[in-house]
Image (tube, rainbow, N blue to C red):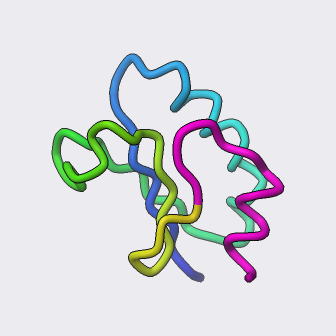
Amino acid sequence: MSELIFVTTDNCELCKKAENKIKFLKPFYQIREVDVQEDHKEFLLRVPVLIKNNKVIEEGIFSRLRVLINLFF
């Protein structure tokens, strides 16, 4: 199963919304949640961020459609 990295932080409303928008991927991907303070500090001002194979799939305000397009194209 492929892994996605979900970069987030505490008390982030945008992160909570993004997490809800990527839940549909759980049957297909292992989603590892990472706190931006502990890892991936280069995304400090861009959270939430979804990464696959070191490629940013989506960031900021998530769209399910953009996530799907970026995962497969």
Residue that lies at the very extreme toward the right in this rendered image: 65
Q: The C terminus lies in which quarter of the figure?
A: bottom right
Residue 38: where, in percent of width, then height? 16, 46
| Residue 53, percent from left and from top | 45, 81
Q: How many marks?
A: 0
The residue positioned 68% from the left and 59% from the top of the image is 26
**49 horizontally vs 70: left or right:** left
- The answer to whether residue 66 is above or below residue 34 is below
Q: Quadrant of residue 2?
A: bottom right
The answer to whether 14 is drawn above or below residue 23 in the figure is above
Q: In this view, does 24 lie to the left or right of 22?
A: right
The residue depicted at 48 percent of the width and 65 percent of the height is 56
Assess whether residue 56 is covered by the magenta stretch: no
Image side of residue 42 versus residue 61, left or right: left
Residue at 59%, 82% (x, y): give it. 1
- Which residues are the magenta region? 58-73
Q: Which residue is drawn at 75% across and 46% down?
A: 63
Q: Nearest the camera: 34 or 67? A: 67
**Residue 66 within the segment the image draws in magenta:** yes
